[in-house]
Image (cartoon, rainbow, N blue to C red):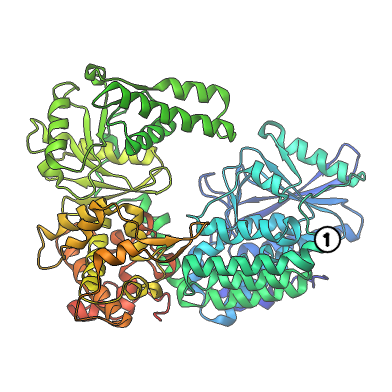
Amino acid sequence: MKIPTFDRNAYAALLDSAEGEVITEAKVRDVTLRSGKTLALITLDNNLDYKRPNTLGPSTLAALGEVLEQQRGRAAAGEIDALAITGKRFSFAAGADLSLVDQIPSREVARLMAELGHHALGLLSDLGVPSFAFVNGLALGGGLEIALNSDYRTVDASVPAIALPETYLGLIPGWGGATIVPNLIGIENALKVIIENPLKMNRTLKPGQATELGLFDRLIEPVNFLEESLNFADEVLGGLKVKRPNEPGRIERAVKWDVALKIARKSLEEKLGTVPLAPYRALEVLAVAKHNDRARGFEAENEALADLISGDQFIASMYAFDLVQKRAKRPAGAPDKELARKITKVGIVGAGLMASQFALLFVRRLQVPVVMTDLDQARVDKGVASVHEELDKLAEKGRLDSDNHSRLKALVTGTTDRSQFADCDWVIEAVFEEVGVKQQVFADFEDIVAEDAVLATNTSSLSVEEIGSKLRHPERLVGFHFFNPVAVMPLIEVVNAPATNDVTLATAMAVAKDLKKTAVITRDRPGFVVNRILAKVLGEAMHAVETGTPISVVDHALDPVGLPMTPFELLELVGLKVGAHVLESHHAPFPDRFFESEHLNALADANAKLIKRDGKGRPGGYTKEFEAIVGTKGKTPLSAAEFRERVETGLAEEVKIMLDEQVVAAAEDIDLCLILGAGYPLMDGGLTPYLDRVGASERAFGGSFHNPPIRGAAHR
């Protein structure tokens, strides 16, 4: 594939739209290799603090293209024997500058963004001399695509993350990634990197994993990274043959490629439905990549990016992404972080599954002593053993070295002697979701711990104020609501009860940050945010079934929203008893807005299964037990459209009430909670933009949550 001479004038319309871009410069210096050959080393540097990663906006790409064009001329003149590109300390490149994308005015200009990336980065494979990427820091999206367009690649073993996250954001890897990756590591591995990982909460790769896949040719320890990378380049120039074990062969292209894509499409349809555009466009480009024709593949990427960048789903995704990246880091209502107390020891009341998850997270992130307790020593021993087993598994996977493994295991202990909690700075309960039980726990431990120790309740919907009503010092009690599974779900709802003081609240926010979680501060109202929305959906679903709407209609009526699972799949995941409790705890204070369901209580009492599943765990129909208990005796069935409209209007009403009650500071906080705590899709922008778009806000209260409306996924 011959790359034309670089001319920035061809991209004038795009460059004119890139106002305010932080430029990442491409600084060049010549390095003499051991062999005496000359390598031109480009360092990407935005000249800012190392905490601000290099990004690739239009002007940055144009400048890089001009630099590479100059080096191509030098190569033709025999002045250099190779070229390498690396990044400033700790940062290779974090991908496209997404803060500028909303300035792109049209599909035509969006296509220029794709073409510019291909043109500039494509020069790396058309220099006339070998090109190398020395990846010494974060490499995401377009950053990784710089490396992919290079002929050879090394990676620093300490790099924190490597990924192509575009489908998570409503795009595809469109600067060569979707074409090059499958031809480098095979179609099945490419599907994991390009589609599966991004859609699993934006999962990233570690350097060792990326090297094992074949994305990199050599993994190098950080101490001598640049020196060893230069030596590797010299070896290649000297004739070293680089083996890439996962490059696809003839059989994979002829037989496995199409089958893998077919299976991936079916899996996407089962998990996501057909509303999200990006993963399906990625599949289309991956199909073209089978031919290993870069010109053809890059053209398919151009068309896909042009459509997606200018489309509604990406605009909504950018709103949601901005919440996750910016608002999450500046939580509304947070007190001065200097007020936070230092945590030197954690106490966990309970030793069951949730308590064990807490202990594992606290010891890994805080690396302080963690003590667990329960009603008897057998339960305590079981809980501690569970944590130790999880640490063993992490060590076996290479995620903990032997020293840290032994140290962390020693930090987790258990006892029935509550006096061992006396020096805990933070005590969190994981006991039954009953007010009286939690009140008794905190009353007992208030007499044991120091007066300034923080007490935290993991209640999912009970009143924190009521839980602390019998304490002498209720000001040190805070709600700290995790989501299950604790290790995976990024949200913590920090509940600011009326008596909670700023020191306690600041400490809770600091702990959440140290746990690498996103904290949203909520008022002490039933269900806080996520469970209040959950209760609304589950209550409407059970009511519709009980009044005659078929289970399948209810369960799939919300598919056009693009939620990660159906209402009854979600109910089965959270647990029937938990679901019944959430519904009851909302019906009691708000009987006119939340339905009660005797059938749900009956299902919970019977420990019923709701969804039929095949051998691979995929859903397919509903159990006879579910159908028998719920029955179909109702006389007022709804159509799917009627049920969906009822749910949407009800949610708009409830969100408006929550904002009027100041449960959170703004609609953006509700969206952030639902994206991070309930898996609401970025393509919708969360919940409130979606409710505006489908007219639910107008129906509910004659207004909207956002003005102007935030475009997003089409309502079908």
> Could you say which is closer to the camera, residue 218 or residue 354?
354
Q: Quadrant of residue 567?
A: bottom left
Is 219 above or below relative to 145?
Answer: above
> Could you say which is closer to the camera, residue 314 or residue 650?
650
> Could you say which is closer to the camera, residue 653 or residue 90?
653
* Category of crowding for the residue at label 1, using alpha-carbon neighbours closer than 10 angstroms: few (below 14), some (14–19), many (at least 20): many
Image spot of residue 7 (x, y percent): 73, 73
Q: Quadrant of the N terminus?
A: bottom right
Q: Is residue 704 visible?
A: no
Is 431 above or below relative to 613?
Answer: above
Q: Quadrant of residue 435?
A: top left
Q: Amino acid at mark 1?
A: Leu
Left or right: 32 as drawn, with respect to 63: right
Image spot of residue 494 (x, y percent): 26, 46
Identity of the residue drawn at 39% across and 46% down: 485
Residue carrying label 1 = 127
Q: Is residue 542 visible?
A: yes
Is 595 above or below relative to 573?
Answer: below
Identity of the residue drawn at 36% across and 34% down: 356
Identity of the residue drawn at 13% across and 22% down: 447
Image spot of residue 525 (x, y percent): 15, 53
